[in-house]
């Protein structure tokens, strides 16, 4: 008998008290492991996440969490060979495993690095700008995102045991939520290995990652208002979870990613001579055969203009005929096995249902020639292409979770969009077209029904393929879809992190908002001292440190000089008559960029010091025109300080207000600088 897969709970590995049930190799039918969670104390697991994991994460800033995730991703990168070797047993070829393993690790890197760039080095994240709630500016509103003290439970499908786990772990961890992962039984041994290696690395704080190998029965009963469940799998199980009392009445948030009948549309403009035709055919065949079609994003419906339906069907069939099926370890093999014999039966049943209204034009569901493998013991299945009769219902309703697609002919763009929508909401659709007008109408038609839309043509084909094509969720983009696809959203860059957090509107005085958010708020106190803030290193600089400059008169000679020097001789700065006729200015005005340049001259401290560079401005607005002989002065205030991890400098955001002699703001903006952590720097 093989070993029992262990769960990782409350800081230790746990083996069930019974023998468990066997999990079989998809290729050979041999037992890989046994699985059971009998006797596992799920209450203790959830309590450990809440009382040990969540507080540990609360101690870390977004940047520190991102740093740990990057370290985990690096650690797993070094273990890829071991993971790939085990992954063969799930039926996956090396190319399939690259999507799962390398794709999963890449997703962690990508989200962690976005977090470092787009989130502050803090535990609170601001949402949008300040809202003025009173006339005087003493009462303001600010939306903030904060971590919730709950648990992120992930219940995953069998098809991506590594990516499925990591793409959910990274955003939850960044958001400050400890994870309990419950992998699907069929491939749980691979998730277990990744979790085991991650725990062994010692990189993650205790309680932030736990594994439930075996049945999750009773887990949802332990969850409450602050907890979330992210489910990927069948619509049937999703229905059970949606009706669980903890979800219905207990406030547990449930995100679902379930069955999705994705389509790809060949644009009506594409001819047999266009390279787009070949792109379309290749994309369909890739989606049918990668992971043996066991992908939630695979193309199930191939929508083709009626006039080209026969040509396209033949081209897809011809390409499918070159696909070698067999042992995924073999170099000759393009498509491995389905995850289990049971799954193969499910797909055969789905093909049978489809045949009610579609004919098979390629592949025999009951027979396939295999290379280096036993066709009976392994869950091998031929790719199958069907062609739907007009008005067929089943292709829009039945999800064959395997290497199966159906060609459906359409008449015109509106018909293609109508057919796509019959999937009742999908994760992704693609349209292959060269015509911008077709692209716009199809995308506008598809968008309400899809989480992601790929527009493919000869210009983006190479890079789109390198990014994984139609079927690859990308860490920076939303993954999820409406309606039948579950209605959930995972990933999407920082959006994926924010899904786990709570947004709260805080109403307070400027002073209080500065204290709460860690970001200086207009209207709160400024500290104007003897030392120019440009003389202070990051260690000495404080939010609110400010400088109020001396005034400067802006002369007509300044404006003329700037116009001539820069070549910006726009009439409002150079032609008195034309400028006078301008309804907004009524005469010559200074260039906005002149005002900003003069302001820099007013606020800088010129000597070498801790301020290393100016890397931009944000939110620049010119509010009041500056006329010749107006006087301006600038107030510069430290708004936010963000030390960079692994660098000897950090970012300082300064609030800049340029005002005229009457105190009216003429320009407002944020100046962005890099400032040394220490000055003078300690010699290396
Ligand atoms: P399931 O819904 O059967 O299983 C998905 C996950 O849910 C597994 O981890 C499973 O655990 C768990 N689970 C099952 N019952 C419960 C329950 N009552 N409470 C909590 N968790 C439960 O889907 P499969 O993975 O078997 O896939 C079946 C079908 O799902 C596919 O044929 C396909 O149609 C669809 N699917 C859709 C995907 C998508 O992203 N759109 C992805 C993968 C599958 P256990 O394995 O231990 O039973």
Image (cartoon, helix red, strand yellow):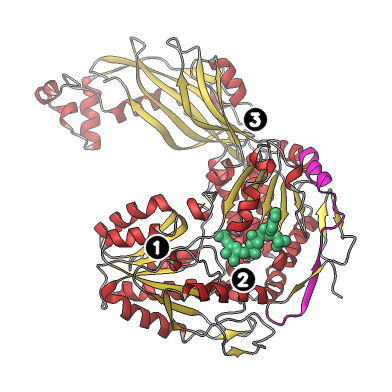
Front residue (pair 168, 28): 28
Q: Is residue 485 above or below residue 323?
A: above
Q: Is residue 8 left or right of residue 342?
A: right
Residues in magenta, as a range = 27-52
Q: Is residue 73 left or right of residue 663?
A: right
Q: Are marks 3 and 2 in contact (CB under 8 Å)?
A: no
Q: Ligand 1 falls in which quarter?
A: bottom right
Q: Mark 1: few, some, or many residues within 10 Å (few <14, many ≥20)? A: many
- Could you give the CA–CA distance between mark 1 and mark 3, rounded to whole angstroms? 51 Å
Q: Which residue is mark 3?
A: 539
Q: Is residue 46 magenta?
A: yes
Q: Mark 2: few, some, or many residues within 10 Å (few <14, many ≥20)? A: many
Q: Are marks 2 and 1 in contact (CB under 8 Å)?
A: no
Q: Is residue 147 left or right of residue 573?
A: right
The quarter of the displayed image where residue 59 is located: top right
User: Secondary structure beneath disc 2?
Assistant: helix
Which residue is rendered at x = 37% and y = 30% of the image?
Answer: 620
- Could you give the CA–CA distance between mark 3 and mark 2, rounded to whole angstroms? 47 Å
Which sits earlier in the primary sequence, circle 1 or circle 3? 1
Which residue extends farthest front?
A: 356
Which residue is rendered at x = 45% and y = 76% of the image?
Answer: 285
The quarter of the displayed image where residue 267 is located: bottom left
Specify the quadrant that holds the C terminus: top right
- Could you give the CA–CA distance between mark 2 and mark 1, rounded to whole angstroms? 23 Å
Mark 1 or mark 3, whichever is nearer to me: 1
Q: Position of residue 354 (x, y in %)?
A: 47, 73
Q: Is residue 462 above or below residue 529?
A: below
Q: Is residue 624 magenta?
A: no
Q: Which residue is mark 1?
A: 430
Q: Which residue is mark 2?
A: 97
């Amino acid at each position: 008998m093989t070993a029992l897969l262990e769960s990782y709970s409350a800081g230790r590995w746990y083996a069930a008290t019974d023998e468990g049930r066997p999990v079989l190799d998809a290729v050979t039918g041999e037992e890989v492991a046994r699985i059971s969670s009998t006797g596992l104390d799920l209450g203790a697991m959830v309590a450990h996440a809440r009382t040990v994991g969540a507080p540990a994460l609360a101690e870390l800033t977004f940047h520190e969490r991102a740093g740990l995730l990057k370290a985990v991703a690096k650690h797993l990168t070094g273990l890829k060979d071991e993971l790939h070797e085990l992954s063969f047993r799930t039926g996956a070829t090396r190319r399939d495993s690259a999507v799962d393993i390398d794709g999963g690790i890449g997703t962690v890197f990508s989200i962690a690095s976005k977090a470092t760039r787009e989130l502050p080095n803090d535990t609170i994240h601001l949402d949008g700008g300040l809202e003025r709630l009173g006339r005087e500016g003493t009462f303001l509103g600010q939306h903030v995102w904060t971590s919730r003290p709950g648990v992120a439970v992930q219940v995953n499908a069998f098809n991506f045991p590594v990516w499925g786990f990591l793409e959910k772990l990274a955003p939850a961890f960044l958001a400050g939520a400890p994870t309990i992962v419950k992998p699907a039984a069929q491939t749980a041994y691979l998730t277990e290995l990744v979790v085991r290696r991650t725990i062994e690395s010692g990189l993650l704080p205790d309680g932030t990652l736990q594994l439930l190998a075996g049945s999750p029965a009773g887990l949802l009963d332990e969850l409450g208002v602050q907890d979330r469940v992210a489910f990927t799998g069948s619509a049937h199980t999703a229905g059970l979870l949606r009706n669980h009392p903890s979800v219905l009445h207990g406030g547990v948030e449930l995100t679902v990613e379930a069955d999705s009948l994705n389509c790809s549309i060949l644009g009506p403009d594409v001819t047999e001579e266009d390279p787009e035709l070949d792109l379309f055919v290749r994309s369909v065949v890739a989606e049918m055969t990668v992971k043996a079609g066991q992908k939630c994003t695979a193309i199930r419906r191939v929508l083709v203009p009626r006039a080209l339906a026969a040509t396209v069907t033949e081209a897809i069939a011809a390409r499918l005929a070159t696909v070698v099926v067999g042992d995924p370890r073999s170099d000759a093999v393009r498509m491995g096995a389905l995850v289990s014999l049971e799954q193969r039966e499910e797909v055969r049943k789905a093909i049978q249902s489809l045949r009610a209204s579609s004919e098979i034009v390629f592949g025999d569901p009951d027979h396939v020639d295999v290379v280096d493998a036993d066709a009976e013991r392994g869950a091998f299945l031929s790719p199958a292409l069907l062609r739907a009769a007009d008005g067929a219902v089943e292709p829009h309703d039945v999800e064959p979770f395997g290497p199966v697609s159906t060609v459906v002919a359409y008449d015109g763009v509106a018909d293609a969009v109508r057919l796509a929508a019959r999937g009742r909401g999908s994760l992704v659709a693609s349209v292959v077209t060269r015509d911008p007008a077709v692209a716009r109408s199809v995308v506008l038609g598809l968008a309400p029904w899809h989480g992601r839309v790929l527009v493919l043509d000869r210009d983006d084909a190479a890079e789109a393929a390198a990014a994984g094509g139609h079927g690859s969720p990308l860490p920076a983009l939303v993954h999820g879809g409406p309606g039948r696809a579950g209605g959930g959203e995972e990933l999407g860059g920082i959006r994926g992190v924010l899904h786990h957090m709570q947004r709260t509107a805080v109403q307070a005085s400027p002073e209080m908002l500065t204290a709460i958010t860690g970001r200086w708020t207009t209207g709160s106190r400024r500290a104007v001292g003897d030392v120019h803030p440009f003389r202070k290193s990051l260690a000495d600089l404080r939010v609110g440190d400010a400088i109020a400059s001396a005034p400067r008169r802006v002369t007509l000679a300044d404006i003329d000089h700037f116009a001539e020097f820069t070549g910006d001789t726009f009439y409002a700065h150079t032609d008195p008559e034309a400028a006078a006729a301008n309804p907004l200015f009524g005469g010559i005005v200074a260039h906005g960029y002149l005002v900003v340049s003069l302001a820099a001259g007013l606020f800088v401290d010129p000597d070498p010091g801790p301020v290393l560079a100016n890397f931009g401005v944000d939110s620049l607005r010119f509010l009041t025109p500056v006329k010749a002989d107006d006087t301006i002065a600038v107030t510069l205030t430290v708004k936010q300080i963000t030390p960079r991890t692994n660098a000897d400098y950090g970012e300082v955001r300064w609030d800049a207000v340029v005002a005229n002699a009457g105190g009216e703001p003429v320009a407002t903006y944020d100046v962005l600088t890099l400032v040394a952590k220490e000055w003078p720097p300690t010699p290396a």
